[in-house]
Image (spheres, coloured by chain):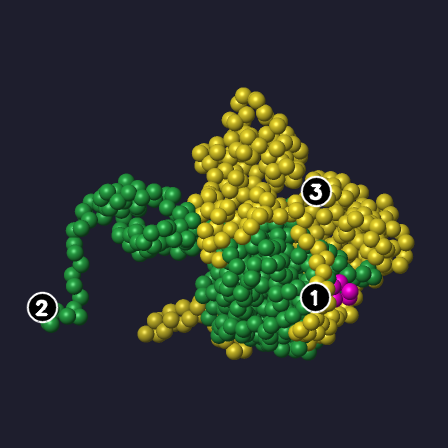
Amino acid sequence: MVDRKRRGQIQQAPENFLSQELIVDLNKNGMDDQRRGFMRNGFIAALGGAVGLGSSLNAFAAGEGDPAILEKQVWQTTLGKNVATMPYGTPSIYEANLIRRESPGLTRVSAASVAFTPLQGLFGIITPNGLHFERQHQGWYNVDPEKHRLMINGLVKHSRVFTMNDLMRLPSVSRIHFIECGANTGLEWGNVAVPTVQYTHGMLSCCEFTGVPLAVLLEECGADLKKGKYLLAEGGDGSGMTRTINLDDVLNEAIVAWGMNGEMLRPENGFPLRLVVPGVQGVSWVKWLRRLEVGDMPYATKDEAVHYNDLMPDGMARQYTSIQECKSVITTPSGGQQLLDKGFYNVSGLAWSGRGKVKRVDVSFDGGNNWKTARLETPILSKALTRFNIDWVWDGSPAILQSRAIDETGYVQPPIKLLRDVRGTRSIYHNNAIQSWKIGANGEVSNVQVG
Amino acid sequence: MFKLANFCKSILLVITTVLTIGSVYAQNTSAHFPGIGRDATPAEVAAWDIDVRPDFKGLPKGSGSVEKGQQLWEAKCSVCHGTFGESNEIFTPIIGGTTTDDIKTGRVASLSDRKQPQRTTIMKVATVSSLWDYIYRAMPWNAPRSLTPDDTFALVAYLLNLAEVVPDDFVLSDSNIAEVQKRMPNRNGMTLKHGMWNSKGAPDVHATACMTNCVQFVQIGSVLPDYARNAHGNIAEQNRQYGPFRGADSTKPPLDKLPGTSAEGMAHASDMHVANKGPAAMFKAENCTACHAMNSKLVGPSVADISSKYQGQSGALDKLMAKVKNGGSGVWGPIPMPAQSQLSDEDRKALVTWVLSGGK
């Protein structure tokens, strides 16, 4: 008989099934084989090796069924770790492969280089802070926030100085935007060069940024926005990174930001302050932002005079090319990946436009001959990544997957051939061509260009 | 009472004085946000507002000769950029690829005739202000903001002399730099005629969204070269080793058939978790890679060069451990290696042992 009074009440946990000494020891030293032995009393498993068995045991062992179900696993039968064992949490050890990586040979000095985001393993539209791509021009620092200042001068009534204390008291906004390096996919202008989406498209991230609108700060300083159509943004690092910002275009959207996905900016991404310029290439999102100067002409800084200009076939360079045009890429399956078997797949990817919202994404499985419209997942935000998905049943024969994004202005992401017809192959920057992934009969996905 | 009131008055006076002095520094002209921010002092603006525009607004007064520029260059710049600004070892070359004809036309011919294998800085840069501004704000690489305006005039003069823009006896100054601008080889090589400065700009490429029977013959124009399949490391270690999208083991030839759900023939999870520790990781984390590469000379010697120089030498470990701790110079060139006192003895030993082994 069930005691009705006791029903629904919390039962007291069985105490003392572990000795007090063992609990103290576990808390201090964590779990190891020896301690597991104490706890599990004769349950013998190849604990280190067990990690590797998962995949080969996927197929059921003959007999009663899947050992992953039939056998009790260590995590079901022993005590797990304490709260705050990792005071700042880190991903599972099984995620260790998904990290930022450099492209060997791209640059010769790691303090002036790029680390790419592993897009092949990410879901949704938000990039985890630890995986946000990095582009450093002269190395990064942990800038002391107490000593960081933002100066605003130039065509303003009052040149002003703000501390972080000042800035973080101001009315703030939080907005989700993508950031893409102007040189993303730049290695692929002439021909296929790199194996995976991490290296073809990984200078791309998307975060929720928090900060004060640029317009609020400029108004506070009495900026002359009739004469002052240009803004020089300057960083506080050794490179004193400077870029000219088109005030006419971005005044209402740019943010002087300190927050990134709910926490402060990471040091390699500009802690404690960076400029967020939605839709514009990443180099203009000046990190460690220390000065804004309102001016009446563009500044032709080094990264506007030597780099970040698009060389055209006639030898002229397009200067101040800033907008990241509409683009998309399939992230799974993508280059270098290996499909295990034929059958159903959720083909998934990212689309974005520096001119507004993504309106539609089409996917082709036959190299661009026939297209189907993919599902756009919410939220669909202006100048943010948009996730798309489409069902696919792979019959095991070779296929070429492509995605093609269309933005709200009606602009259609072009095939590489169309881009080359206009811009040649030497511009380095702003390659927003349709990406093709070939899937071989062996299930290996490889980077190819069609046409 | 009177006395006390007087006393209070004088305190007030003192307080007022303090406030007045304070407000020179912290004057608040805020329109909307009382208590937030303050006016910048002229000295503060002068300290930070160092940018130089193409119209030379912001250029300080000063001058520097080609000759002085050469001395500075050889002392501070040539180790990375080469004696003639031609080096391609650490950064892309600065000088080369321009002609006296280009100086006349203001268009660098090699940008369109493609005879130059690599684009140099002088081929691309249209504005001499860009060179001045950048050298002054960010060079040398490991000691930015250490050059004076006169140093900067001299260095720009030297570079322009290498490119035959100015003669050997030239002295560049704030008063003649505008004349020099008229001789910049690529001064007419930039265009603003494009739709990518403004988000409302017109695109230059117009694709259509065809849905069916769009391409008669799908032709693959370019594939990943075989040597590039594994050039970025093993792709299996760059993907999840569970779930539907594994990475191909690029250290081995492609599989000859689909692995099936058992993932037969594929790398397994127990092979992974490449330890992100050890001397190789430390070499990077401690910023050794800022000056030392594995096989090529950067600011300092390569790991391979150090290893072969000290191969078989007794006492090499102790000698190099001391060098890492205290810094040193003179063995490989004039640029001193800074002391790395932050390393523990144990880490230092592991690092040096690893370097001496050639990074194995």
Q: Which mark, residue A1?
A: 2
Residue B149 in view of the camera: yes
Q: Residue furthest front?
A: A63
Residue A289 percent location from the top left of the image = 57, 62
Relative vertical location of residue A429 with respect to residue A386 in this rendering, above or below = above
Residue at 85%, 45% in the rendered image: B168
The verdict on a common chain for dots 2 and 1 is yes
Q: From which residue to which does the magenta span run?
A: A415-422
Q: Residue at x 65, y 70 (%)?
A: A370
Q: What chain letter is assigned to the residue under label 3? A: B
- Residue at x 49% of width, y 53% of height: B260
The mark lying in front, picked from 2 and 1, is 2
Residue B56 horizontal/vertical position (percent): 76, 62
- Give the image quarter of residue B339: top right
The Cα atoms of the two marked residues, 2 and 3, are separated by 85 Å
- Name the front one of labels 3 and 1: 1
The secondary element bearing badge 1 is classed as loop
Please check the rendered image and state whether residue A418 is part of the magenta-colored stretch, yes or no. yes
Tell me which amino acid carries mark 2: Met
Which numbered disc covers residue B89?
3
Q: Earlier in the sequence, mark 2 or mark 1?
A: 2
In the rendered view, tell whether residue B252 sits above or below residue B224: above
The chain displayed yellow equals B
Q: Which residue is under mark 1?
A: A415
